[in-house]
Amino acid sequence: MHGYTATANPDTSAKALGKELPISPKLAREVCGMIRGMKVDKAIKALEDVMALKRPVPLKRYNKRVSHKQGVGPGRYPEKAAEAILKVIQSAVANATYKGLDTESMELVTITASRGRVIPGHIARAHGRATQCNQDTVNIEVIIEEVE
């Protein structure tokens, strides 16, 4: 991933990238889907609730053998993914503040999670053998824009 996948008006929007974050790509995708299109302050509150185990993230795609949460259906509390995505959103808000934009009326226009580089690793096993244990990474792209 070299840059942004979406274009936005630089006069009314702010962007931020989080590259090669050590979180689960599947859960990052679900968290991004939950907050896409929200106002920025509502999205930050939702992510803080996920980290406090108060609000589950509904799993739409990767939900085999996942217990149901009340009012949501199959869902989980991906704290690590929520924390990483929250930092990228806060970075975009800081960029908007620096540009002089009104952060109270901003909305998450684009938020995507794409697979990053795989960091190879291994675990030592019995009899001198080894098993692969690779670390998946995620690239998060956030574009926030002022709305009327």
Image (cartoon, rainbow, N blue to C red):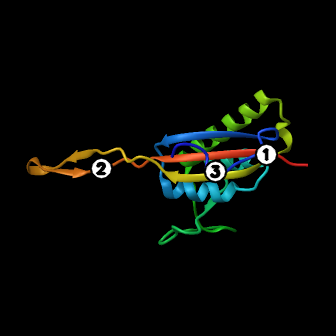
Say whether marks 1 and 2 touch (CB < 8 Å). Answer: no
Number of the front mark, 3 or 1: 1
Q: CA distance from mark 3 to mark 2?
A: 28 Å
Q: Which residue is mark 3?
A: 50
Q: Which residue is mark 1?
A: 145
- Outermost right residue: 148
In the displayed structure image, the side of residue 3 where residue 89 appears, left or right:
right
Q: Of the numbered discs in the image, which one, if any, rests on residue 133? A: 2
Number of the front mark, 1 or 2: 1
Say whether marks 3 and 1 touch (CB < 8 Å). Answer: no
* Residue 37: x %, y % from top left: 75, 56
Point out the tag, 1 or 2, that comes first from the N-terminus.
2
Tell me if residue 13 comes above or below residue 127 in the rendering.
Answer: above
* Type of amino acid at the residue the image marks with label 3: Val
Q: Nearer the viewer, residue 12 or 41?
A: 12
Q: CA distance from mark 1 to mark 2?
A: 39 Å
Point out the tag, 3 or 2, that comes first from the N-terminus.
3
Task: For label 1, count other residues whose C-alpha is less than 10 Å away and answer few (under 14), some (14-19) or many (20+).
Answer: many
Task: For label 2, count other residues whose C-alpha is less than 10 Å away and answer few (under 14), some (14-19) or many (20+).
Answer: few
Q: Secondary structure at mark 1?
A: strand
Tell me if residue 22 comes above or below residue 56 in the rendering.
Answer: above
